[in-house]
Structure formats: structure tokens, C-alpha cells
Amino acid sequence: MRIVIVAETFLPTVNGVTHSIQRMLDHFVDRGDEVLVIAPSSADPDDSGLDPSIRVVRLTSVPLAGYSSVRVAVGGVSRVKRILAAFAPDIVHLASPFELGWRALRAAAGLGIPVVAVYQTDIPGYAARYGLPLLESWAWQRVEHIHSGATRTLAPSTSAVRQLEVRGIPNVQLWRRGVDTSRFHPGKRSHSFRASIAPRGVKLLGYVGRLAAEKQVDDLRVLQDIENSHLVIIGDGPLRPALESALPGAHFTGFLGGEELATAVASLDLFIHPGELETFCQTIQEAMASGVPVVATGRGGPLDLVDSSRTGWLYHPGNLAQLRSQVVDLVGDDAKRAAFSQAACASVQGRTWPVLCEALIQHYEETISEHALLRL
């Protein structure tokens, strides 16, 4: 199959969208598919980790105001249309589309190419979190335009599917995310990592992700004084200095990747995720695969991932007293925490990337068939 992936964000930026694309590319290479990636340019592009068979076309981009690590591709539809016409794909995959994805949708429509649009980032929700209601309204218009124009939309959770269907977007299907259960595994737990942070016996309460307003990491302040525990913040982002001031007792690791991340996650006793804008939340799956129980907000993607009272706890959004009480409950109950740990690890077995990528290929094939019928 000839596949074009239009990536709103790509390497060297590391986030949930890029991670998903990398796993997809690995699978497509194994299958022998021909793949072209269209992505924003980067000040320091590094595609060396990709298979040589994968072509990457970088479009001129500018840094997003206030978030310089994010690049936004600029330019018109015609350039994207020329790229698509030259490659002649069977399918165009829009990964978390917004600006570049919108142009690619128009280009594909002009060439009669079927489009799968993958909803992965709640951009309108981000605008609301940053107190920009006019931008939120405009963002929803853009999201609705893109996903209504796609041949098929894929969303990663039942909550995200409902969110789009309520907006009147047709043909929304569920496509979850995989997890690397060999990389994220309870066996990666490290006593030396734990000892470098807190004395023996102290429970490590961890967060993994971007340090930005939409992640609500400052909600973890209510956990700072829980007896026999220590906060561990894994990640980086624009709010790191402010969070280091707000959470003076926490241990900040900075960005971790690869085996360092797998070791850190498996070495936690509890994983905490306070963000309410997750369409999925890959870090929760990685924690569960590592045998770490989860306490997360009961909104969005976590609703599908956390089986409350079996693999972790879900607290009512905004109820930080409930968040604290649930964490206190698990910190103080070794038997319950161990039971949740085993159940969490078992719950993600079978959610591997090869399985999920084969499901994606099936979506591609069905979308191509649907598109052909629509053109009759």
C-alpha cells in the first residue's frame, strides 16, 4: 500500500502524536508498504532513526507563539497537492490534523484521494484552558471542517468518539493506541533509581508528561505532604520553573526517553495523571504495563483505561480532595496496591502496537472501499 502520513508535529519533537507515528512507520516498513511523511520543518531535523525506505518532506514552518518547541507549517494547498500528486498514494493519513492537516485535506479532495483523519489532540480544549474562548470557537470550526471532510475519522477513546459525534461529525470509528509491553514492564523496576530519590520504604508518586498548563500538573500540590511518599515529576516544558517553585519537595528528572523512561516509570509506586483534556493518555498505558497502579481524573481517555477500584482510581474532575484521599488510600495499603498493580499490568496485555497497526490497516482498506463507492 502507498501511504502518506501528514504529521502536524514530527521528529525531533517527542509527544504522543510523534510516538504513534513512529510505531506506525515501523509496522508499515515491516509490511513492505511505501510511505511518505509530510511534516513541518525543524531547526534541527533528525530523521536518522527512520528506516531509509521512508521519505520525509519538510514544509517551511514557524514556531508557535508562546510554545517555541512546537512548529506550525506555513504555505498554501498547492504545494501539498503537488507532493501528493507526485507520490500518488492509496490513502492519506492525517495525524492530529489542524493547520497542515486542513491543507492536506483540501489537496487530497482535489485529487480524489481517500483520507483517514485521526483525532488525537483536543486543541479547542487547550484554547479553553488557556482562557481563549474566541480561539476555542474557531478551533472547533476547524476541527469540524477537517473531520467532516475526511472519508473516515478515527478517535482513540469512547469519550473522544462521543465528543466528535455530538458535534455532528460523521463516520467516527474507534481506534485505540498500542503499548510496548516488552519495553514497559514490571521487571524494569530499579532499586538504584528509587534510592537516588528517596529513602527505602518511601512510596514514589509519579507524573510523566509535558509540563504545560493543559496538563494541570500543579494539581499535584495537594499530594506534597502525604506521609511516607515523594513526588517524582518526569518530563519538561514551559511551566517547569513555576512548578519547581510550587512543588519544592518534588524530584524533577527533566525529559527522559527510551530505557531511562521505562526504568523510571516501573520504579514508581503510583502513577498520577491530573489532566482533563486527554483524548487517550498513552502514559497511563505505559504505567499500567509497568505494573504501576494509576490515579487519574475521570474525564476523557482515562475513562477507558482505568478500571476504578481494580487497576487504580478515577476521581471526579476538579475534586482535588478526592484525588488526595485516593492516593493516601493506596500509599497506606500495600496489599491493595499490589493487587491493583497485577490487575493493571494484565489489563494491557494484547494491546501491542502490531495488533493496533493491523487494525489501522483494516481501517485504511475499508476507507479506500468506501471512497470508491462514493465516487460511483
Image: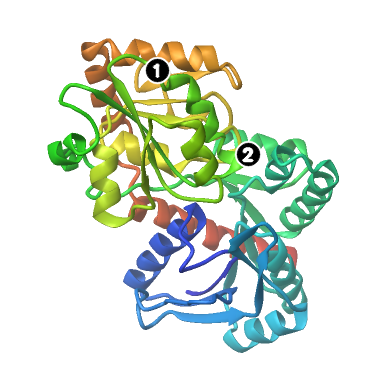
Is the residue under label 1 in contact with that under label 2 (CB below 8 Å)? Answer: no
Q: Which mark is residue 225?
A: 1
Asked whether 49 or 318 is in front, the reply is 318
The residue that appears at 61% across and 37% down in the rendered structure is 277
Q: Which mark is residue 161?
A: 2
Q: In terms of secondary structure, where does tag 1 sit?
A: loop
139 lies left or right of 104: right
x, y percent for residue 71: 62, 67
x, y percent for residue 328: 37, 12
> Number of callouts in the render?
2
Using the image, determine if residue 339 lies above or below residue 94.
Answer: above
Which amino acid type is marked by label 1?
Asp
Alpha-carbon distance for marks 2 and 1? Answer: 38 Å
x, y percent for residue 351: 35, 43
| Residue 202 placement: quadrant | top left
The residue that appears at 42% across and 47% down in the rendered structure is 235
x, y percent for residue 288: 32, 34
Using the image, determine if residue 69 lies above or below residue 298.
Answer: below
Q: Earlier in the sequence, mark 2 or mark 1?
A: 2
Asked whether 241 or 118 is in front, the reply is 241
